[in-house]
Amino acid sequence: NNAKVAVLGASGGIGQPLSLLLKNSPLVSKLSLYDIAHTPGVAADLSHIETRASVKGFMGPEQLPECLKGCDVVVIPAGVPRKPGMTRDDLFNTNASIVASLTSACAKHCPEAMICIISNPGLDPARVTVPVIGGHAGKTIIPLISQCTPKVEFPQDQLEKLTARIQEAGTEVVQAKAGAGSATLSMAYAGARFVFSLLEAMSGKQGVVECAFVRSDVTEVPYFSTPLQLGKKGMEKNLGLGKLSPFEEKMVAAAMAELKASIKKGEEFAKNFK
């Protein structure tokens, strides 16, 4: 209940509402906000909210070390948003460079901190849990509707349409906003939810489970999103795929080629990043 949490990219479309949600949590005692611009204003605005977390803004690379010092959890929503007609791959080099620089700083200035990097997918409706496994984009996003609680069943044609809509949820919002932004509010909520779950698990709460994209031996690819049991040290146990329906098995198989390519691209970028 005395956690210091940093938001890196706190002035952006996800960062601002995410910071607001974190400011409202009794789990957070110190909130450090970092971005390349406008963070003093965001921090000043949030400081007028009468909750326990103290808020401080940090702006520019020279202030990043102080922002990170003593952090328990670092959340990274930083990056450039998509615009209509763009794919996530179009933004890879720009956003990968941003995240790589920030995580390198975390390794140097808060090496014990848990690091949460925001990516698609995220939001589960209240009272409904649907594990979403696989990767970050398009057909690599695999909702396991057969494992939904409470249990649901759909005719095959409805199941295919629902699955496709979940996979393209981010694109749907980008198009609906007509170039004015991407899925920032729902992503901020999803990021805050994950941070709250992580903080509760770090405080000793048992049975905390969330999906995240991590290094894994569950499938033939080295990184894969699955339900994880969280604990005091972060990820305590990878809960794996569970029992898949034939439809879901086909989706996992179909995702492998794209996942292998995107992972290889990421690993090569990390290897060459300086």
Image (cartoon, rainbow, N blue to C red):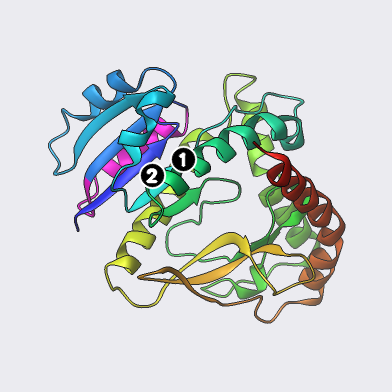
Q: Residue at x 75, y 55 (%)?
A: 140
Q: Residue at x 82, y 56 (%)?
A: 260
Element class at badge 2: helix
Q: Is residue 86 above or below residue 188?
A: above
In this picture, residue 229 sits left or right of residue 142: left
Q: Quadrant of the N terminus?
A: bottom left
Q: Position of residue 151 (x, y in %)?
A: 57, 75
- Amino acid carrying label 1: it is Ala
- Amino acid carrying label 2: it is His
Q: Is residue 222 above or below residue 185?
A: below
In this picture, residue 134 sits left or right of residue 9: right
Which is more toward the observer, 248 or 91?
91
Count neighbours of disc 1 (C-alpha within 10 A) and say few if under 14, some if 14 to 19, many if 20 or more.
some
Which is more toward the observer, 149 or 227?
227
Q: Residue at x 30, y 34 (%)?
A: 66
Which is more toward the observer, 187 or 269?
269
Q: Quadrant of the C terminus?
A: top right
Q: Residue at x 54, y 63 (%)?
A: 211
In this picture, residue 238 sits left or right of residue 113: right
Element class at badge 1: helix
The circle drawn on residue 105 is 1
Q: Position of residue 176 (x, y in %)?
A: 63, 27
- Contact between labelled residues 2 and 1, with CB atoms less than 8 Å apart: yes
Which is more toward the observer, 42 or 85?
42
Taking the image as drawn, is residue 189 in sight?
no
Per the image, the residue denoted by label 2 is 109
Q: Is residue 47 above or below residue 155?
A: above
Q: Position of residue 239 (x, y in %)?
A: 57, 77
- Judge whether residue 28 is colored magenta: yes
Taking the image as drawn, is residue 85 in sight?
yes
- Judge whether residue 138 is colored magenta: no
Q: What's the magenta region?
A: 13-29
